[in-house]
Image (spheres, rainbow, N blue to C red):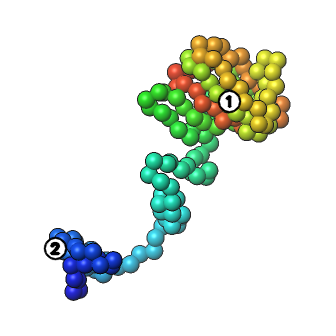
Amino acid sequence: MDLKPKDLFGAENSEEEVDLLEVAAQLALAGQLESPSPGLKARLMAAITAPAEMHVLRGDAVKWRATPYAGVSYRSLFIDRETRMHTLILRLDAGAVYPRHRHTRPEQCLVLSGDVENESVTLKAGDFEWMAGETIHNSLTTRGGCELLIIASLHDEVLA
């Protein structure tokens, strides 16, 4: 391969860059071609379409995880290691109960779907709740099931 020390846009390349381009071209032609793994294009496009400071988590990329509580599962979206805050989606199936717990820092909760009840307050899809830090949250219950977007401390603890 006869490369000139200019790139495709006419800019000068150093001799080292030309050598690297020649090696890359030889490597590309030397091996046997293999089919890419399924989903590779989608993963590459997701990775290159977001700015470097933006992190995109596709909906099907995070699996639901079981909890020790019947009918309660969650998907972890982000853990801020500096602040020790956790962003997650909490799912309660119809009739499920999430036990009494203590918030060490403020908790934020957006009801994405369904209904959730804490003490005498019922929240529905679109409702937002904020709980102060160093407070106790009684059991959460749901009649029809719900999904909640939660931002809470990793140091919160179940009291039940």
In-image side of 61 versus 116 (left or right): left
Q: Residue at x 50, y 35 (%)?
A: 79
Q: Is residue 37 visible?
A: yes
- Tag 1: residue type? Cys
Image quadrant where residue 75 sits: top right
**Near-viewer residue (67 or 43):** 43
Q: Residue at x 79, y 24 (%)?
A: 117
Q: Position of residue 86 (x, y in %)?
A: 54, 31
Q: Residue furthest bottom?
A: 2
Name the residue carrying label 1: 109
Which tag, 1 or 2, sits closer to the chain's start?
2
Q: Position of residue 5 (x, y in %)?
A: 21, 78
Instruction: Answer few, some or many: residues within 10 Å of disc 2's Cα (few below 14, many 20 plus, some between 14 and 19).
Output: few
Name the residue carrying label 2: 15
Q: Which quadrant is home to the C terminus?
A: top right
Position above or below: 45 against 144: below
Q: Which quadrant is home to the N terminus?
A: bottom left
In-image side of 87 versus 28 (left or right): right
* SS for callout 2: helix
**Near-viewer residue (35 or 120):** 120
* SS for callout 1: strand
Q: Position of residue 111 (x, y in %)?
A: 73, 34
Tag on residue 77?
Answer: none
**Near-viewer residue (61 or 104):** 104
Q: Position of residue 87 (x, y in %)?
A: 57, 35
Q: Nearer the viewer, mark 1 or mark 2?
A: 2
Position above or below: 65 against 109: below
Real-space Cα separation, disc 1 to disc 2, in angstroms: 58 Å
Position above or below: 143 against 44: above
Instruction: Answer few, some or many: residues within 10 Å of disc 1's Cα (few below 14, many 20 plus, some between 14 and 19).
Output: many
Image quadrant where residue 69 sits: top right
